[in-house]
Each structure stands twice: as structure tokens, then as C-alpha cells.
Amino acid sequence: MSTPFEPRDRFVDERLPPPDLRPLMRYDLADLHIAERSNLVDTLMERAASKGWLDRPFLRSQRMTLTYREADERVRRIAQVLVEDFALVPGNRVLLRGGNSIGMALAWLGVVKAGLVAVASMPLLRAKELREIIQKCQPSLALCDGALLDELQAAQEASEPAKALKAIVPFNLMDEPGSLAVRASAKNGEFARCNSHADDIAMMAFTSGTTGSPKAALHSHRDILAACAAWPAQVLKATPDDIVIGSPPLAFTFGLGGLLIFPMWAGASVYYPSKPYTPQSMLETMHEVGATISYTAPTFYRQMAPLARAQRPTSLRISVSAGEALPQTTRQLWLDATGIDMMDGIGATEMFHIFISSVPGQTRLGAIGQVVPGYTAKVVDEQGQEVPRGTVGKLAVIGPTGCRYLDDERQRNYVKAGWNHPGDAFTQDADGYFFYQARADDMIISAGYNIGGPEVEDALLTHPAVAECGVIGVADEERGMVVKAFVVLKSGHLTDEAMVKALQEHVKATIAPYKYPRQVQFMTSLPRTETGKLQRFKLRQGLA
């Protein structure tokens, strides 16, 4: 941590998990040289300078393109504003609220460069949800897209901790006195380097809510730099010529890594749309900007596939899927439409990004992939002992990143004996390929059989009438649990008993018959997080 004589807010330091509940960290990675005094943003910009990337494009939108040099200057000006105008000191939290945009990216980088803790929030959150985040992290300042101020202001008015905010500052209004953009334009960009320690916390990421109550995961400058040397460097292998697009919000670690930090590590550029993507607009953008790498959830790829078949995105070379289980049907649809073998991966907010991933050309039917270099993963039983290959158990992971919750008793459920337990049920084959079964709490045990909901979902999605679906287990007096499917049909299909029977018979003919959904409920839509994850807990609660 920073030395004692430096002005510093110790709020986060004092709320880290106790040492015996922290994950063990392993740093046996190539191209990983992290000085003890390291700031994430300084290190990435210095890397750009040393690689000759400063005059290459970095941040793109329909309105402008900034080079690394131009972005660096703007980030330094923002850091000046935070320190000089608002007297913020390292360790202060800054809440960021905005969609994917150049303004949001620059604001996040400016916060971290100044040695502050970036707390990004999903743009669709309402006052109640924002109030919970504010009460948890107690930010000193909020930077907000001018179009999203109302809910944040409502949250501030209703929360005692929120009243401690020095200000809520719009970051993207060029003609409003007091906005971040106007304040930054008056600075000279001469910002003294912050004396950050590599282990200082750089960001706080709130979980996306698939299990209800969100948790705040903490990541240091070292964590994020180490993550750059793992999956991006060893598996993705982006180049300075790549143009990256995607739908995950920057407030989600999948989006923050894929659509900001990892392009910086590679010297690539990233394009931000003027409004949130639809499957149609994302495909159109691929064509318009010559995108070479895309990030989105399986649902988006499934919806884009028929469009891509008609107008193939010829510039695209890598498609990354994460955020939820990738059905084999969706992978095949995308491959047939584009010729691209999708790069699947599993990560976690608590681990920052992907730690198990497929490599195009080395995929195995039904498998997510193999462990990412730098990480070790195994499938274990309830006692933490590794189970025989092919046996269903819980995933345990160790590597250069790990879970540290802010002041949360659930830390002891996630980290056990130094290993991270993301809460996923897996099997592993003899060659080290990992096969996702379900979230551990989503495993359905029916009449003694273990049934993974995603496997049933995958079978249902191969039926021509099914647009999307979600599967859970429900209590049953005779069998303990039975499989229940929530199904959204494509237009033109009837939601009647004949369709229920057809879907059940289809599943029986596709996978083991005992796995078929004994209950089917038709829906017009399924509850999903802002990142596209299916919220099965809402299906279980009957809140869909």
C-alpha cells in the first residue's frame, strides 16, 4: 500500500478481507514485469510509448477518433480536475455512471490515473440500486453522463452517505460550466505522476445481480496488469491493427477488459456506438468500421447469426463470447453464418476476466475450453478435494487474480484455502478440457439424477420454434425436483399443449430422456441482467 506519510483515504484498506480469507496469487506469467510502484494507467500509456503506438488510433466513435497521445493528454487533464478542483486523495472512491462512450472511458482512466478507486455502475440502474451502491462504497464524487443524472440525484437525496458526495459532475457536457469536460479543457495536462503502489485498489466492481444482492469485488493495479498478461496476451493475441467492438458495459468487468483495458495492452483501438447496440446495429457497425474483434453474450450472437448469413462481416476475425454459458447450437449457428469459430470463455467479476477459454481451431464439442496460462483450475468435491476426471464437481481456480470483497461475509464462501470458488459445476476430461454443467446452485437433482439446466436449454434451442429459453429445477414431492423450462417462441408458433408435447419429445430425442422438462411455461421474454445474463433466480422466485 502507499506509504503512511502520503495523504490517503483508508476506507477500502480497512475493509479488505482478513488475510486468512484472501486468495493466494500466482504470477508465473510471461511478459509480466510489475514494479512495486505501479499505476495501471501510467503503465499502459508508458507501454504505448515504448511500443511506438502513441500516434495510433485508440478511442473511436462516430464523432471522433483519439490517438493514444491525445487520450493521454485528456486523461491527465481529468486527473488534474479531480485532484485540484475537488481535493481528492488516493483511496477516495469515485462513482462513474454512463454507457459505453469515449467520455466514460476517459473518465474511468482519469480516476485511476489519479490514484482513486473507480466504481463504475450500470447505466440502467435506478435510484434504489444506486443508493445501495453508494451506501456500500461511500464515494467522494460522482461522474455521470449528463443524460443519466436524474436517478443518481434521486439516490443522493434519499441516502445519508450520498450526501457526503462533494459533487455530482456531468462528464460529457461541453457547454455546461462545471462539467468535467469544461473543467478539463481549462487544465494544462501537467499532472504529477501518482505514487501508486501496485497493490493499491484501483477499482471496485459490483456483481451483476444474477443471485440477487450485489457484492463489491476489489481489484488492484497489479491484478489488472496481471490479467492483461494472461488471457489477452496468451489466448486472444490482439494486434495494434485490431478494431474492437462489443456490447458489454464498461461497468461490467467483461466489458471493461475487452473494450478498454485489453485493447490498450495490445495497442489496438476500440469503437463506441452512439447508442446501445441491437443485433442489427452491431452487425452494421462491424461492416462500417471494419471491426476485427467482437465481444458480446451468446444471446446476441444467436440473434445476429441469421443477419450475418445474409451479409457476412468480412473484416471480423475473432468473436468472443462470455457472460453466460454458450450453447453449442449458438456456436454452430455463428460458425455457419460467418466462418468464425467462436472463442468461448468463463470469467467472473471476482476474478476480473476470463480464466478458462477456448482457442479457435482447438475447440472440443461441448467444452468451454482449457485453463488460461497463468491460472490453475480443478474440479473439486464439497471438501475441496479434486474429483476423478469426468465427474461433476465444483470449479476451483487460482492464478494472478482473485476474489476480495469489500466488507462482505460471503468472502468465506468464495475463497477457501486460498482457492477461488466461482460457484460453477463442471466436469473436466482427460485432456484438460472443462465442460460447464450449471451454476452450482442451479444443478437439478431429480430422482437421483444430476441434470444441468444449460444442457436442457441447449437441446431446446435446437427446436426450430424456440427463440430463447431458461431452465430451472422446481420442487416435486415424488422426484425431489423436476426440470421446468421457460420458453420464448418465435413468432407464428402457438403456445398450446401440442407445442409443450413437441418440445418435450424433442428434448427426449436430443439428450437423455430423463432430462426432459416435465413442466413448460411460455413467456414473451426472459429476465436478463444488463450484460445479457439470464437471471434464473428471478425465474425461481416467479418474478419474471
Image (tube, grey):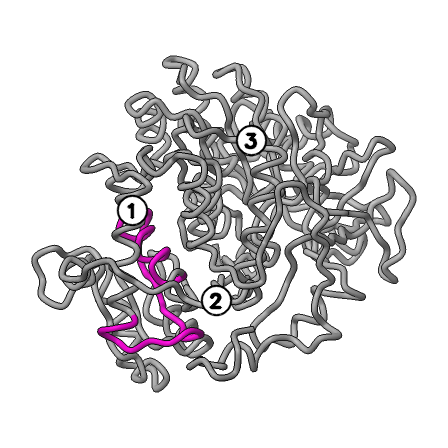
Q: Position of residue 350 (x, y in %)?
A: 60, 59
Say which label, 2 or 1, has the lower sequence index.
Answer: 1
Circle 3 is placed at which residue position? 237
Q: Is residue 447 visible?
A: yes
Check the image and report above or below for 25 versus 354: below
What is the spatial separation of the Cα atoms under label 2 and label 1, in whole angstroms? 21 Å
> What type is the residue that disc 3 sits on?
Lys
Counting labels gives: 3
271 falls in the magenta region? no
Q: What secondary structure is marked by label 3?
A: loop
Q: Residue at x 87, y 33 (%)?
A: 430
Circle 1 is placed at which residue position? 71
Specify the quadrant that holds the N terminus: bottom right
Contact (CB < 8 A) between labels 1 and 3?
Answer: no
Quick one: label 3, few (<14), some, or many (20+) residues within 10 Å?
few
Q: Which residues are magenta?
A: 83-112
> What type is the residue that disc 1 sits on?
Ala
* Left or right: 294 as drawn, with respect to 439: left
Q: Position of residue 227 (x, y in %)?
A: 58, 48
Quick one: label 1, few (<14), some, or many (20+) residues within 10 Å?
many
What is the spatial separation of the Cα atoms under label 1 and label 3, in whole angstroms? 23 Å
Quick one: label 2, few (<14), some, or many (20+) residues within 10 Å?
many
Q: Position of residue 187 (x, y in %)?
A: 18, 62
Which label was assigned to residue 195? none
Q: Residue at x 50, y 28 (%)?
A: 319
Splitting the image into 4 quarters, where does residue 356 fall?
top right
What is the spatial separation of the Cα atoms under label 3 and label 2, in whole angstroms? 28 Å
**Residue at the outermost bottom position:** 160
Circle 2 is placed at which residue position? 196
